[in-house]
Amino acid sequence: MNHERVSQLIRELLVELGEDPEREGLRDTPMRVARAYEFLTSGYKHDSADVVGQAVFESEVNNMIISRDIEIYSLCEHHMLPFYGRCHIGYIPKKKILGVSKLSRIVDCYARRLQIQERLTSQIAHEIMDLADAEGVGVVMECRHLCMMMRGVQKQNSVMTTSSVLGCFRKEIATREEFMTLIGK
């Protein structure tokens, strides 16, 4: 990211909003915003194979593995406002398991891009299915969208829930129900 160029664009935006970018409280804001957007969109610089690295392990385990309540923060691609919430992931391995922290890293890899929640949920599920060569994967995401809370319909208590189920989680109702029960849904 070209920090100077982004900083200049933010400075221009401040002027268009009727602000004085030279006033004390705003003097350093353009560069701070440039750095913030670099972090908030850092997922474009990574792919999940890189963040998982060598943390794919051979295993005899064939039970459901679940990681619940993974915090998620992203920016909606329509208004570039945050959405945030929780992500629950479950998968059944064939012969490979992923390091437990890698599930959260996969979430961050895709969440730190301009997103819509529906696509984000699907991307996470497909990536885990591919990286773990799993029998099945389930991902449920529950998020609050500031574009709905701060503007537009202004619904403060709305939560959007999305799910993506692949493999045996899609084909076998009992597997899907076990996953939903274990994540408390």
Image (cartoon, helix red, strand yellow):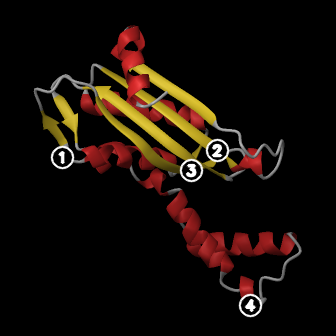
Q: Which residue is mark 2?
A: 144
| In this picture, residue 24 sits left or right of residue 164 | right
| In this picture, residue 184 sits left or right of residue 118 | left
Q: Amino acid at mark 4?
A: Glu
Disc 3/disc 2 C-alpha distance (Å): 10 Å
Which is more toward the observer, 97 or 34?
97
Which is more toward the observer, 145 or 7?
145
For this orientation, the residue located farthest to the right is: 18
Q: Amino acid at mark 1?
A: Gln
Which is more toward the observer, 148 or 46?
148
Disc 2/disc 1 C-alpha distance (Å): 34 Å
Disc 3/disc 1 C-alpha distance (Å): 26 Å
Asked whether the beta carbons under mark 4 and mark 1 sit within 8 Å of each other, the answer is: no
**Of tags 3 and 2, which is closer to the observer?**
2
Task: Give the image quarter of residue 126.
Answer: top left
Q: Which residue is mark 3?
A: 74
Q: Which mark is residue 54?
A: 1
Q: Which residue is mark 4?
A: 24
